[in-house]
Image (tube, grey):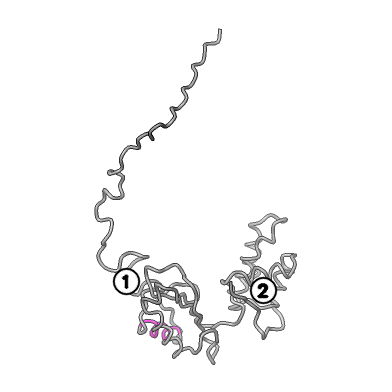
Amino acid sequence: MSVRRLAKDQPASFAFTAESQKAAQWWLAKYPEARRQSAVIPLLWLVQKQEGWVSEPSIRFVAEYLSMPVIRVLEVATFYVMFQLEPVGKVAFVQLCGTTPCMLRGANDLKTVLEAKVGPRNTVSADGRFSWEEVECLGACCNAPMAAINDYYYEDLTPEILGQILDDFAAGKSPQPGSYEGRKSSEPKDAIQTLLDPRLYDGSLAKPIKALPNAPEKPKKAKKEPVA
């Protein structure tokens, strides 16, 4: 597991906005009073949705909010990679999958696009609007290569498509997430090639289970004698 540390440059303080405060109270209402610390992950997520990342002052804020030791909140924030510990792009934060399926389908070409349009990985662009990083498998291998941008998956990418998506974000648009080959979920790219015969999955070919040889017989239930 890689070591995850807090950013060197930190803001002076943190506080929830009115909207985040309302959402935090909604989450706390889901837990008994004695278990309010269980809301640490939702509250850290609210911090990240508000600021784009999780800072040291925000960790202290959540700890005080939930009446728990700061170190315990720090442990959660540094353990889960869903929490960004450094500032990210305010318009688009790209997490490009570089694991084997995506790499075989052209992820390296997508890296070239990101380096040209955004800059080096793990750094925020000069205007503060874009950043990107390479991540491990995001679970959309059937639609490789893909990337998570902000809260959504963008799949079946090509260098040209990714470049256009980044241009659209820069222009203030909201590019449509999902597959850019028009398929739904993880359905086959072309014609279906597997499970063409319904008998393969409807149970009609299933054979009755035979008793194992030398298997002990089930004990017979004793008959109840009638009560006199």
**Mark 2 touching mark 1, by CB under 8 A?**
no
Residue sitting nearer the eye, 197 or 87: 197
Badge 1 element: loop
Residue sitting nearer the eye, 77 or 98: 98
Q: Which residue is mark 1?
A: 182
Q: Amino acid at mark 1?
A: Gly
Q: Is residue 166 left or right of residue 76?
A: left
Give the percent coordinates (x, y) of residue 123: 55, 86
Quarter occupied by the N terminus: bottom right
Q: Magenta residues, as a range?
A: 161-169
Q: Is residue 203 left or right of residue 71?
A: left
Give the percent coordinates (x, y) of residue 216: 44, 29
Which residue: 52% across, 12% down? 225
Answer with the quarter of the image where residue 161 lies.
bottom left
Q: Main secondary structure of the magenta part?
A: helix
Quarter occupied by the C terminus: top right
Q: Which residue is mark 2?
A: 16
Q: Amino acid at mark 2?
A: Phe
What's the CA distance linking mark 2 and mark 1?
40 Å
24 shown above or below 52:
above
Answer with the quarter of the image where residue 77 lies.
bottom right
Badge 2 element: loop
